[in-house]
Amino acid sequence: MVTQLSLLVLNKGMGNLKFKEGYYVEHTTGPVEKFTERNGISGGHNYDEFENYFNSNSNKYELGPVVKKEHPDIDGIFDIEYKVKYEKMDYTGKNGTGEYKVIPNGDKVYKKTVYDPKIISNDEIIDLSKKAMEEGLNNKREIPLLKQKKIKIQGQTDYNGKNLKFEGIMNSETGEIENAYPVVEWVD
């Protein structure tokens, strides 16, 4: 099924690749969609938007130290590791205890690849991601995510003479590419 879907999409050419409207661009470049204690930030690949989420007064979470690992070849792309904290509530359910819980626990950290929009613009990252998704489908770098009815696409494209890798998620039922984001290395 994966190969048939890929061929169906590729036969149409990139101009007809389907990118999920109202979500594809926003997931990568727009504000953070959500934060869960299990997985961390969803969306927020634009580092400014990632930071804005934690600087918001309406957010109960505070960003802890962020460790940045720069892409070895491409300025403006980096992996980050981070933790967050939030104030514990008192027995009545109100904040103000002055005590904080740090998550995730222990040596675990949340991980994410982000880009600096001051170096690589939002429009540029979207254009690069679309080229990378086409390249990944052309080269059949696809990992079925059967329980989710999705396909992970691993693609790459040229950026200033260097390969910039992306991972994206395609809905295996609709053929829409729902999101794509830069990565330093692909994850299986």
Image: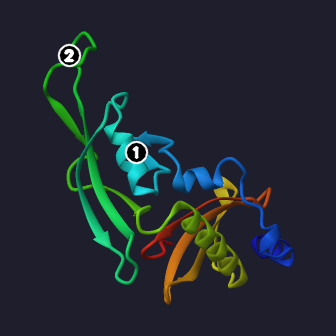
Q: Position of residue 144 (x, y in %)?
A: 65, 67
Figure quadrant of residue 79: bottom left
User: Quick check: 47 above or below 6?
Assistant: above
Q: Amino acid at mark 2?
A: Asp
Judge the density around disc 1: few (<14), some (14-19), many (≥20) Cα neighbours within 10 Å. few
Mark 2: secondary structure: loop
Instruction: Return the residue at label 1.
Output: 38
Figure quadrant of residue 180: bottom right
Q: Position of residue 12 (x, y in %)?
A: 86, 74
* Residue at (62% x, 69% y) in the render: 127
User: Quick check: 159 above or below 124?
Assistant: below
Q: Nearer the viewer, residue 101 or 62?
A: 62
Q: Amino acid at mark 1?
A: Arg
Instruction: Return the residue at label 2.
Output: 90
Q: Position of residue 161 (x, y in %)?
A: 50, 90
**Residue occupying the far left of the picture:** 98
